Image (cartoon, coloured by chain):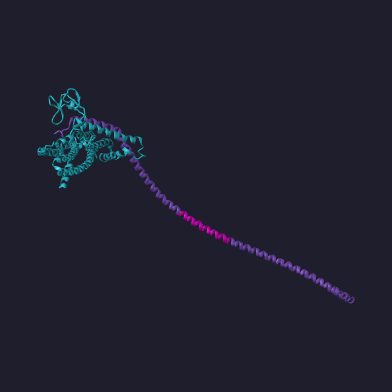
Chain colours: A purple, B cyan
Amino acid sequence: MNLVTPDFGLLFWMVVIFGLVFFLLAKFGFPVITDMVDKRSAKIAQSLKDADEIQARMASWKVEQKQMLEEARREQAAILREAAETKSKIVADAKAQARAEAEKILSEAKVQIEAEKESALRDVRREVALLSVQVAEKVLRHELSDEGNQRAFIDELVDEASKAQMHS
Amino acid sequence: MILTFLISLLLLQADPSAQVPQDDITAVSQDTPVILSESEESAEADIDVGEIIFEHIGDEYEWHITEWKGKPVAIPLPCIVIEDGVHVFTLHHAAENGYALNEDGKLVNAATGKRPIDLSVTKNVLALIMSSLLLLVVVLFTARWYKKHDALKEAPTGLAAAMEPLVMMVHQMARENIGPDYRRFSPYLCMAFLWILLNNFLGILPFFPGGANLTGNIAITLVLALFTFFIVNLNGTRHYYKEIFNPEVPAFLKPIMPVIEVFSAFMKPVSLTIRLFANMLAGHIMILSMVCIIFIMAKYGPLLSGGMTVVSVLFGVFLDALECLVAFIQAYVFTMLSSIYIGLARAQDE
């Protein structure tokens, strides 16, 4: 049966041709392809690993960011609170200072008013004294206008003066 | 009933032993004379199914393509014969050179009837040259893409995109089955896989560039298996040979084991040869038989022949689809087993 007996010619050609093509492709064909694809696979694997790492780092960053945000918010609240406190303190201080100033001004004014009053009273007093002197003068002048009165008055004054002399 | 026929066909296909095609062939050729005798009453010219099938699955000294106006259209091929010197001639001039065809269709010395050393470029050799060149060009072009482009930055396009999955599938297989030094053996496995796959598909093609029954020829599969055999045994490690000649077995088995192991080492290429050869041959014969049924039934009246034509076309389509599957599976199995054998030969001491 020639189907199951290998034909020598075909064997020969198969060895030659298959061997030749195998040699060429093993040298210039398959290694080029497989090396390149292997390299690419390695690169893809590396990239995936890198991506995973980056993702992990991103996640940690996110947590950090959250913490930072919270901290900032807390700080903000603290600053606001402090500012409010400072504000109320400043207002209170200002109020106190204003009150003190006002009191000082008031007391100064009182003193001045007192002094003015005093000086005014002194003036009034002086005026009254002058007026009374003038009135007295006028009364005296009127009483001493006639001769008898002048003599009586002189006598009286002389008496008085002599009495004063005698007593001393 | 059709279902059982279908299953039996599948079984026939799946059975890798060499018996299947032989049975098939004998069945067909036994049927043929019966048909002949029946049809002798009708004056129509008859067809010899056995001859047709053998013509398609066998080898020829010229590539018969078709008949045109009663004349055969064939590619003449050089017959190269070595017998006290090299003789080169075409089949038409065989007689002038003192050669004739014997009953198997082989060139013999017309005078002595002996077979000379026959290195003729037959139909199969031409198919072998063409398909090998095609594979060479395709793979080198693919390799060129990888040289010209930065594969780290670009996805493969065109031919490279088509070839990459196939090549990498085999490369992956080599990595899984062979071990750390798989890179040395991956080119051979890629070559074997792609070559068998290409020729399996070309064998299914019914017209010119295909149509030769290469992977269903035992010489071809024998060479492929021998390549695997030599690669396996020339690269055997100390551990591999120790397992063959001095395995760790009970003392009474010691004299038997090397015999069994050596036998097994030689049976591996034989099984590779026959598995691929028988599967592909059986597939071709089944498809051809289906096609032949149409012509056989032609003289049994329009009803019967029409009905059978529909059936055989349907079965033909089914078998063609099956063959496409088998073409891939057999290429894969051959490569897979080769890689496993290489992997066993590369085993290291624990």
Answer left or right for A79 relative to B32.
right
Which residue is farthest top? B84
Q: Position of residue A12 (x, y in %)?
A: 20, 30
Q: Quadrant of residue A14?
A: top left
Give the residue displayed 49% in from the left and 57% down from the top.
A78
Q: Quadrant of residue A147?
A: bottom right
| A140 lies above or below A36 | below
Q: Main secondary structure of the magenta part?
A: helix
Q: Nearer the viewer, residue B182 or B30?
A: B30
Q: Which residues are magenta?
A: A70-93
Q: Position of residue B234 (x, y in %)?
A: 23, 33
Q: How many marks?
A: 0
Give the residue displayed 63% in from the left and 63% down from the top.
A102
Q: Quadrant of residue A158?
A: bottom right
Which residue is farthest right? A147
Q: Can you see residue A159?
A: no
Q: Quadrant of the C terminus of chain A?
A: bottom right
